[in-house]
Amino acid sequence: MEYDFDGTDEAEIRRQKAKARELRKTRWWQQKTAAGMCHYCGRKTAHGDLTMDHLLPLARGGRSTKDNLVPCCKSCNSRKKTMMPLEWQEYLEKNKD
């Protein structure tokens, strides 16, 4: 599936990734991941196996802000890629077991 990205430049994406790395070190992120729950599939996951995902992906104009970051398992994060939340929901519905 091809996407028409918003043209966010590489320098801005690097800045946002650096911001996300800093947020990962905060008490806020520790509290967000303490339950060990994936935001997308709801499965309990070991704390160390949770990744940080941007609801609105950086490649699609998202930013590293607390309201745009969620903990998720590696499986969901790699499958979601650069999908928007609605696209991800449609993907899940289409691929239900």
Image (cartoon, rainbow, N blue to C red):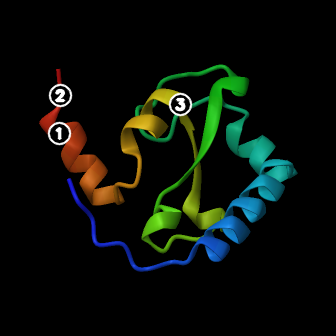
Q: Residue at x 55, y 22 (%)?
A: 44
User: Where is residue 32, by image quadrant?
Assistant: top right
Q: Say which mark, if any, is on residue 63.
A: none
**Residue at the spot 24% in from the left edge and 38% down from the top edge:** 92
Q: Is residue 88 left or right of residue 90?
A: right
Report which quarter residue 91 is drawn in: top left
C-alpha separation, residue under disc 3 versus residue under disc 1: 18 Å
- SS at badge 1: helix
Tell me: residue 32, above or below residue 84. above
Name the element at disc 3: strand
Residue occupied by mark 2: 96
Whole-percent x and y of residue 66?
67, 64
Q: Say which residue label 1 marks.
A: 93
Residue at x 52% of width, y 34% of height: 38
Say if mark 1 contacts mark 2, CB within 8 Å.
Answer: yes
Distance, label 2 to label 3, CA atoms, is: 18 Å
Disc 2 packing (10 Å; few <14; some 14–19; many ≥20): few
**Secondary element at image label 2:** loop
Residue type at the position of mark 3: Cys
Label 2–label 3 contact, CB within 8 A? no
Assess whether mark 1 and mark 3 are in contact (beta carbons under 8 angstroms): no
Residue 73 numbered mark, or none: 3
- Residue most toward the front? 10
Q: Position of residue 83 (x, y in %)?
A: 34, 55
Q: Quadrant of residue 23?
A: bottom right
Q: Quadrant of the C terminus?
A: top left
Q: Earlier in the sequence, mark 3 or mark 1?
A: 3
Q: Earlier in the sequence, mark 2 or mark 3?
A: 3
Local crowd at mark 3 within 10 Å, few (<14), some, or many (≥20)?
Answer: many
Q: How many marks?
A: 3
Is 28 rendered above or below residue 3? above
